C-alpha cells in the first residue's frame, strides 16, 4: 500500500480534487492502493454530496469568518476541518473481499483509526455506520463513494480541533442530536487533547499508518504525489470552487 504524507496543508478545493483524482487514477490502474494523510490549510468545511447546504452549515458564519467550504463527492455529514487540530485520511482501493459490503468496509477501514487511538492510550470504539467514538463521543467520522468497483473513503481524526468554532460552523438537526442523547454538537464530539491533555502528532501519524497496514494486511511504502496526480487534480479543482457544485442542493 502506497502512503502519501501531505501534512503541510492545501486548501479545501485542492484537497477534494486530489482525492477525486486518486480515485480516478486507481480505477484506471495508474496508481496503487493509496493512503493519504493530509491537512486543510486554511481551516475549512466540507459537506456531504447528498446534503442540502443550508441545512448543514451556518453559511453566514462561514462567510463572515472567511472559512472556505465545498461539497464532497462522498456522502455523510458536514465536517469542520481545523488546520491545526485535525488529520484527514483518504484511501483508494478496490471493493474486494470484506470491502464489497458497505457496512463491513466501514468497519474494516475505521478499524484502522480504532487501532491508532488505542495505540496512544484511548479506548476507542467503532460505531456503525461510520463513526469512531471515545467515551461515547465522536472523535472521527468517515464517508465514502464507490465507482466501477473501487472505493474512495476519507475521514477525520480530531486531535485538537477548536470545538467552539466547529459548533458555530455546522448545523445538526435537533432530532439527530436527541437520538445521540445530547443537546448540542459540542456535547457530541471530543478531541484527543481533551482526553489526554497533549498530543504527539508524529506518533499519531505513525499509529494511523500502522492501523491501516494491519486492517488491510498490507505492507506500506512511502511516496509523493506525482505530476500526473497533480495534473488530473488541476483539471477537477475548478468544480470544487464553483457555485453550481457547492449549492447543487
Image (cartoon, rainbow, N blue to C red):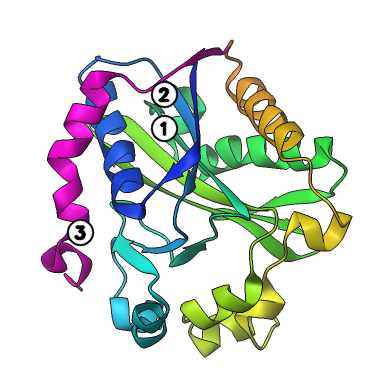
Judged from the image, the secondary structure of the residue bearing numbered disc 1 is: helix
Q: Residue at x 85, y 60 (%)?
A: 195
Q: In terms of image quadrants, where is residue 64?
A: bottom left
Relative image position of residue 4 (x, y in whole percent): 48, 25
Please report contact status of discs 1 and 2: CB closer than 8 Å, yes or no.
yes
Residue range corresponding to the magenta coloring: 220-249
Q: How far is mark 3 from mark 2, CA to CA?
A: 33 Å
Question: Label 2: which residue?
Answer: 96
37 vs 59: above or below: above
Q: Residue at x 42, y 60 (%)?
A: 76
Task: Assess whether residue 243 is covered by the magenta stretch.
Answer: yes
Q: How far is mark 3 from mark 1, CA to CA?
A: 32 Å
Q: Residues within 10 Å of mark 2 (few under 14, many from 20)?
A: few
Task: Identify the disc placed on residue 100.
Answer: 1
- Give 117 or 50, whichever is nearer the viewer: 117
Q: In terms of image quadrants, where is residue 163?
A: bottom right
Relative image position of residue 59 (x, y in whole percent): 34, 82
The residue mark sitting in front, 3 or 2, is: 3
Relative image position of residue 235 (x, y in whole percent): 13, 38
Q: How far is mark 1 from mark 2, CA to CA?
A: 5 Å
Question: Label 3: which residue?
Answer: 241
Quadrant location of the C terminus in the rendered image: bottom left
105 vs 28: above or below: below
Amino acid at each position: 500500500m502506497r502512503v502519501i504524507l501531505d501534512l503541510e496543508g492545501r486548501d479545501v478545493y485542492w484537497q477534494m480534487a486530489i482525492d477525486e483524482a486518486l480515485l480516478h487514477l486507481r480505477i484506471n490502474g495508474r496508481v496503487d492502493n493509496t493512503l493519504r494523510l493530509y491537512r486543510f490549510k486554511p481551516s475549512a468545511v466540507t459537506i456531504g454530496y447528498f446534503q442540502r447546504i443550508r441545512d448543514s452549515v451556518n453559511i453566514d458564519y462561514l462567510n463572515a469568518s472567511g472559512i472556505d467550504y465545498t461539497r464532497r463527492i462522498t456522502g455523510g455529514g458536514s465536517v469542520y476541518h481545523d488546520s491545526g487540530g485535525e488529520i484527514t485520511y483518504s484511501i483508494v482501493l478496490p471493493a474486494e473481499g470484506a470491502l464489497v459490503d458497505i457496512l463491513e468496509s466501514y468497519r474494516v477501514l475505521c478499524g484502522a483509526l480504532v487501532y491508532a487511538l488505542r495505540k496512544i492510550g484511548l479506548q476507542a470504539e467503532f460505531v456503525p455506520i461510520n463513526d469512531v467514538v471515545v467515551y461515547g463521543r465522536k472523535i472521527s467520522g468517515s464517508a465514502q463513494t464507490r465507482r466501477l468497483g473501487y472505493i474512495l473513503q476519507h475521514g477525520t481524526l480530531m486531535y485538537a480541533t477548536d470545538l467552539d468554532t466547529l459548533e458555530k460552523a455546522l448545523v445538526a438537526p435537533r432530532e439527530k442530536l436527541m437520538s445521540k442523547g445530547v443537546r448540542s454538537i459540542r456535547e457530541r464530539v471530543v478531541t484527543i487533547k481533551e482526553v489526554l491533555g497533549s498530543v504527539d502528532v508524529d506518533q499519531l501519524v505513525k499509529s494511523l499508518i500502522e492501523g491501516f497496514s494491519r486492517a488491510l494486511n498490507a505492507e506500506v511504502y512511502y511516496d509523493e504525489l506525482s505530476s500526473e496526480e497533480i495534473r488530473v487534480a488541476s483539471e477537477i479543482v475548478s468544480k470544487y470552487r464553483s457555485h453550481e457544485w457547492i449549492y447543487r442542493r
